Amino acid sequence: MPAPSSLLALQQRAQSAVSRRDWSVAEEALGAMLRLDPQQPRIWLALGDVQEQLQNWPSAEACWRQAAERDSMLAEAHYHRARALRVLGYADLAREALNAALQIQPKDANALQLRAMLEEEGGDLPAALATLDAALQLAPERAALHHNRAVALHRSERHAESLASHERAQGLGLDVADAHYNHGNTLQALGRAEDAKAAYRRALARASQHALALYDLARLRWALGEDEDFSAELEAAERAEPLSALPLGIRAQLLLKAGRAQAAAEAYRRATRLSAEASGYWDGLGQALSLLARHAESIDAHARALALAPQDVNVRCNAAHSLLAAGRAEQAAAQAEAACQLAPENQQAWALLGLGWRLIGDPREAWLNDYERFVRVFDLPMEGGFNELLAEELQALHTDREAPIDQTLRRGTQTRGNLLDQPHPRVQALKAQLSAAIDRYVAELPAEKGHPFLGRNTGRWNYVASWSSRLRSQGFHTNHVHTLGWISACYYVAVPPAVQQGEAGWIKFGEPDIDLGLPPRRVEQPRPGRLLLFPSCMWHGTVPFEDTAERLTIAFDLRPV
C-alpha cells in the first residue's frame, strides 16, 4: 500500500497545478497517484477532466470509463464519458453512458441537457424539446437550456417560439458567439434580415473566425442584393487573421458558387499556400480552374486533393466532373464509380457515372436513367382557386431580392427552411395531396435489387427538404441533381403565359451542367396543379423564359425509411 504522505503530496501538487491551469503538471501528478493506487475512481475522474482541458478526448473518455468501472454508481463518470463519446462521434455509446448516469441521478439538469442535445442531433426534435422542458423545470434560470430550446424550436420551424427562447437566454446573460449566430438564423427565418445581419455581426465580434457566421452573413447579404460587397466581413476576417486560411477558403467557396471563377481560383490558390494539407482548398481550386477551361491545371489540383483525402466522396465527384469537362470520359467514369463504391447512395456520384457512361456509349446509362419510366407526371385535382390562394401564401414567404448564392436559381428567389413542415394552411392542404401521389408513384415503381434508384424502394418514405422557388423574366434553374434525396419533385403553383410558346420555362431532364453538346432526353411543360416526380440523381434544369408573370413552384426531396 502506498504511503499516505506520498499520495497527499501528489494530491496537493495536482490541485495546485489545476488552480494554475498547468495541465501538463496536473496530468503528471494524477498519473503518479494512479500508479501508486489505480483503484481510486475519483482520481480517474480528475485525470479525465485534465485530459479534456488538453483536448485529448480519447484519453478523457478512457479515464472516465475507468472511473465508472471502479464505481458503477458514480454518476459523474457516466455523464462525462457520455460527453466524450458524443464529441468522438459515438452517439449510440454516448446514449448508453448517459442512460446509466440518469438511472443514478434522474433529476440531473446537466445530464438532461446532454440527452436533449443527442436527441436533437439524432433528428428527434419532439423528444429533445420534451427533455429540455424537463431540464428547465429543474434549472429554469439556466441560459444555455433556453438557447438549446431555441435551436430545437428553430429546427422544428417554430420560429416565433424560437425567438422568444433566444431572447430569454440573452436576458439571462448568454453572450457567446454561437448564441448570437443561432439567434441570427431564427431572425432570418422570420424575414427580419437586418436584425439577422446584426446578430451575425455580434457573433463575429466575439469570435472573428466563426465559420458559420461568416458564411451565412455573406450568403444573406448576397440574397439581399448586396452582391458588390457581400464578402466584406470575410475580407475583414482575413485582415484580422492573415495566417488563417478559414475566411479565405469560405470566400473562395462563395465566389465559386457565384460563378466568379477567376476570383475563386485566386482565393483558393492563396488558401493552399496557407494550408497546403487541406484537401478542400485543392479541390476548390480544381473546380475553379475547370470553369476557366484550364483543364490540365485543374486535374493536377484534384490529384493533390485526392492524395490528401482518397476516401472523400465529394473530392472524387469533383475530380470526375473536371475530367468530364476536360474530355476524359473514361477516367471520369472510373472516378465516379469509385465514389459510388465509397458512398452507394450519393446522388452526385451516380449522376456523374451515368454521364460518363453516356459519353462512352455504355448501355448501363439507359439502365440507370430510364426517363420514360422514372419521370412521372401527376395533374392533381385541386379545387378551383386553390393554387391562386396558395400562390398568395407563398409570395409572403419570398422575402429576399435575389436567389441564394449556393442554389441553382438564376433571376429568382427561394424560401427558407423546410416549407412542407411549416404551418401554412394551404401548404399543409397541398401536402396531403402530394403524399397521396407520392404513395402511388412509389407503389408503382418496378422492383430491381441492385439498382441505385429502384433497389432503395422500401415502400415507405419521408420528406427531407422542401422549399418554394420563384423565377422572374429570364429566370431559370441551372442543370443539377439533388445530392441528398432519393426522389425529387416539383409542383407548379403558377406559371407565366410564356410556357405556351415553344419550351420556354419548361423543365428538362438529362442535360448536364457541363457543355458537352448533350441535349435533354425529356422535357415537360409546367401547368398549375402539375406534379413531377423523378430520381434525385437525374440531371434536370429549366429553360429560361421572358414574361411579366412569374413562375412559382414548390420543390422537395424524399428519402426511403
Image (cartoon, rainbow, N blue to C red):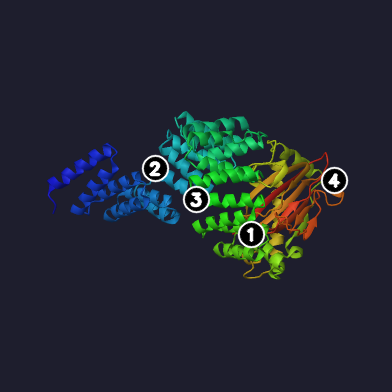
Badge 2 crowding class, 10 Å Cα cut-off, few under 14, some 14 to 19, many 20 or more, is some
Q: Which amino acid does label 1 sit on?
A: Leu
| Disc 1: which residue | 323
Residue 432 visible to an observer of this rendering: yes
Return the residue nearer the eye: 492 or 370: 370
Q: Distance between the residues labelled 1 and 2?
A: 51 Å
Q: Position of residue 57 (x, y in %)?
A: 37, 50
| Disc 3: which residue | 278
Name the N-terminal-most of marks 1 and 3. Answer: 3
| Disc 2: which residue | 110
Return the residue nearer the eye: 32 or 514: 514
Q: Where 541 sits versus 165, above or below?
A: below
Return the residue nearer the eye: 225 or 144: 225
Name the N-terminal-most of marks 2 and 3. Answer: 2
Q: Where 355 sits versus 202, above or below?
A: below
Q: What residue type is labelled 3?
A: Ala
